[in-house]
């Protein structure tokens, strides 16, 4: 009798009942729960539902990382765009600065790319190199045709000629400029083959790294797709130094100088719009699903 009374008191104190099966629960309630069911203060709670709620909470904060990350990437691209615009500005200033005497030290030359220099000497037209295919750099024409689907750009080659510097006692390479395909052969432009001593102003250029999908240079056919100064210098017996002659070096019948294209790939504005667009879209979806509780 005493044990029965103690047991009733214990049951009265304990208001939570754990039911390992569902046979004690009415059929309408049973269908809503899975696994272990807890009856707390007259309310049945499924442990599966509790676990699902924890998973939803974890998913909620994990998905929030997507708009946060895309916002950070968009902000980073803003800084990258500022840096790129400043770099382009500095390069353009170099190409319009007062010319310096050409240094022969390779380390010094690496710091002077796109810098204007001055040399004096004679061309050796017996050995020319052709960087092709190339289109003519004409800023005025490009500005007029900006935005058009079709352009009238003419293709040809840049003529690179050995140049004997009388003031420095060395032999370098000079990109004299652009010629159309019909005038690549020297005999088609004999009037433009300067024989006397001249003073040139040009822009220092360095070797290029071959980009993907760009063909290898064909030394035997004298067809150069990118600047490889070491190999070019070996072929014609010069120092691995190249300058692009400016537009003022152009003579009637000769290559058109000023073929230095000072452009850098600048697509950061597109990246900014892309990342911020993704941030806005994912933020809206997150708000709809986890704040307004609307199925997305």
Image: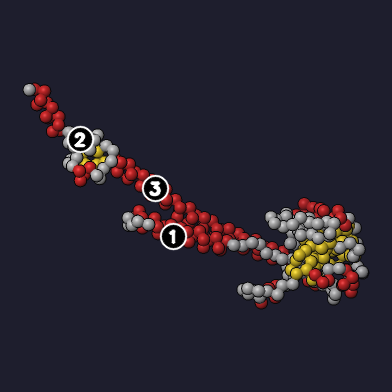
Residue 117, image quadrant: bottom right
Tag 2 secondary structure: strand
How far apart are the two marked residues, 2 and 3, measured between alpha carbons? 31 Å
Residue depicted at x 20% and y 35%: 17
Image vertical order of residue 270 relative to residue 10, above or below: below
How far apart are the two marked residues, 2 and 1, measured between alpha carbons? 46 Å
Tag 1 secondary structure: helix
- Numbered label attached to residue 17: 2
Q: Where residue 112 sits in the image (x, y, percent)?
A: 75, 58
- Numbered label attached to residue 59: 3
- For marks 2 and 1, the one nearer the N-term is 2
Residue depicted at x 86% and y 53%: 234
How far apart are the two marked residues, 3 and 1, measured between alpha carbons? 18 Å
Residue depicted at x 57% and y 61%: 268
Tag 3 secondary structure: helix
Horizontal placement of 189 versus 213: left or right?
Answer: right
- Numbered label attached to residue 195: none
Q: Where residue 167 sits in the image (x, y, percent)?
A: 89, 61
- For marks 2 and 3, the one nearer the N-term is 2
Q: Which residue is mark 1?
A: 281
Nearest the eye: 3 or 213: 213
Q: Where residue 70 sits in the image (x, y, percent)?
A: 49, 55
Residue 135, image quadrant: bottom right
Q: Quadrant of the C terminus?
A: bottom left
Can you see residue 244?
Answer: no
* Label 2 environment density (alpha carbons within 10 Å; few <14, some 14–19, many ≥20): some
Nearest the eye: 238 or 41: 41
| Camera-nearest label, 2 or 1 | 2
Q: Quadrant of the N terminus?
A: top left
Can you see residue 65?
Answer: yes
Residue 92, image quadrant: bottom right
């Amino acid at each position: 009798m005493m044990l029965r009374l103690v047991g009733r008191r214990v049951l009265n104190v304990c208001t939570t009942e754990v039911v390992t099966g569902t046979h004690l629960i009415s059929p309408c309630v049973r269908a809503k729960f899975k696994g272990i069911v807890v009856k707390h203060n007259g309310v049945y709670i499924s442990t599966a539902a509790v676990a699902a709620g924890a998973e939803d909470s974890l998913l909620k904060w994990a998905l929030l990382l997507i708009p946060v990350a895309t916002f950070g990437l968009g902000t980073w691209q803003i800084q990258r765009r500022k840096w790129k615009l400043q770099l382009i500005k500095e390069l353009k200033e170099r190409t319009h600065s007062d010319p310096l005497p050409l240094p022969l030290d390779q380390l010094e030359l690496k710091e002077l790319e796109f810098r204007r220099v001055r040399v004096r000497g004679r061309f050796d037209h017996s050995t020319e190199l052709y960087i092709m295919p190339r289109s003519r750099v004409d800023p005025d024409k490009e500005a007029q045709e900006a935005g058009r689907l079709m352009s009238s750009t003419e293709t040809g080659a840049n003529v690179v000629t050995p140049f004997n510097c009388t003031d420095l006692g060395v032999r370098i390479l000079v990109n004299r400029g652009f010629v159309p395909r019909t005038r690549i052969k020297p005999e088609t432009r004999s009037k433009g083959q300067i024989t006397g001593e001249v003073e040139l102003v040009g822009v220092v250029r360095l070797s290029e790294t071959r980009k993907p999908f760009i063909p290898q240079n064909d030394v035997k056919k004298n067809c150069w797709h990118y600047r490889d100064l070491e190999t070019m210098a070996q072929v014609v017996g010069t120092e691995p130094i190249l300058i692009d002659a400016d537009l003022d070096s152009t003579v009637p019948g000769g290559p058109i100088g000023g073929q230095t294209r000072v452009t850098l790939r600048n697509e950061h504005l597109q990246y900014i719009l892309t990342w911020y667009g993704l941030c806005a879209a994912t933020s809206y979806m997150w708000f709809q699903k986890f704040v307004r509780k609307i199925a997305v």
